[in-house]
Image: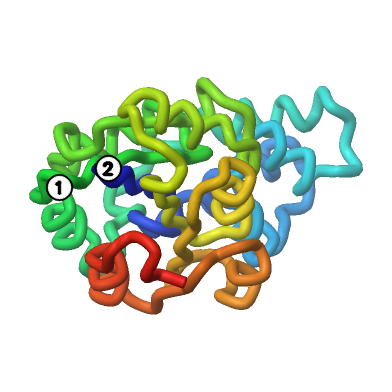
Amino acid sequence: MQLIIFDCDGTLVDSQHKICAAMTHAFTTLQLPVPERAEILGIVGLSLPQVFAVLAAKEPASVQAKLAELYAQDFPAHRTGAVLNDPLFTGIGELVAALAGRRETVLGIATGKSRRGVARILEREGWSRHFVTIQTADDHPSKPDPAMILRAMAEVGSEPARTLMVGDTTYDMEMAVNAGVRGLGVGWGYHAPARLLAAGAERVVPSSAELLAALSEPLGALA
């Protein structure tokens, strides 16, 4: 058995428009300057308390907490067509279907999203049966703490040598290193490939087709 754990935002789905809209809502509601788009995308993957500790570092903890509350209220937002604002990246639907069809492969998710947010995507895409273990920010410390990966391995009975983390941020790769598992980066997300490699990724793949090919290689062949 091989356990493949995926990050969600920036890896499976492109949530940048939705995330930036919710950030704008939170900051403008409190009449605070909205961070630059690059700053916002740079923290995707962290849990909400850590997000606002970075983006609103000069504000007191009470303001950071209020920002997190406002962000959560607006995300997922009730704006018209909001569900369309986090589409799958190209080829991801086919990739998940292919992996889910392998008897020796178990799929999981480890994400800074809430469990509610993940459940919405799984239902929308018909993936509820595909992902066996779901680890979210509701139940764990923020990445790069290894808790999500460690719990996922425990739930399915996998060992570090049989586990792979796939993600688009340095937080994903650092989490993999901290958990003692391999990390594979994707080049279409929110952190540059060079940063992923510096954070411990064995490889960064530029497309979903190359990701599927990499995940089809025998263990030990990715490096």
Camera sees residue 80: no
Percent x, y of residue 214: 31, 70
Percent x, y of residue 162: 37, 46
Percent x, y of residue 2: 28, 46
Q: CA distance from mark 2 to mark 1?
A: 7 Å
Percent x, y of residue 32: 78, 45
Judging by the rendered image, the residue that carries numbered circle 2 is: 107
| Amino acid type, callout 1 | Ala
The residue under the point 15% across, 33% down is 129
* 22 left or right, relative to 187: right
Q: Are marks 2 and 1 in contact (CB under 8 Å)?
A: yes
| Amino acid type, callout 2 | Leu
User: Is 99 or 79 nearer to us in this picture?
Assistant: 99
User: Is 202 or 136 nearer to us in this picture?
Assistant: 202
Camera sees residue 144: yes
The residue under the point 55% across, 49% down is 176
Judging by the rendered image, the residue that carries numbered circle 1 is: 100
Q: Earlier in the sequence, mark 2 or mark 1?
A: 1
* 217 left or right, relative to 16: left
Say above or below: 108 vs 33. above
The residue under the point 54% across, 44% down is 22
Image quadrant holding the N terminus, namely top left
Tell me the SS state at disc 2.
strand
* 132 left or right, relative to 69: left
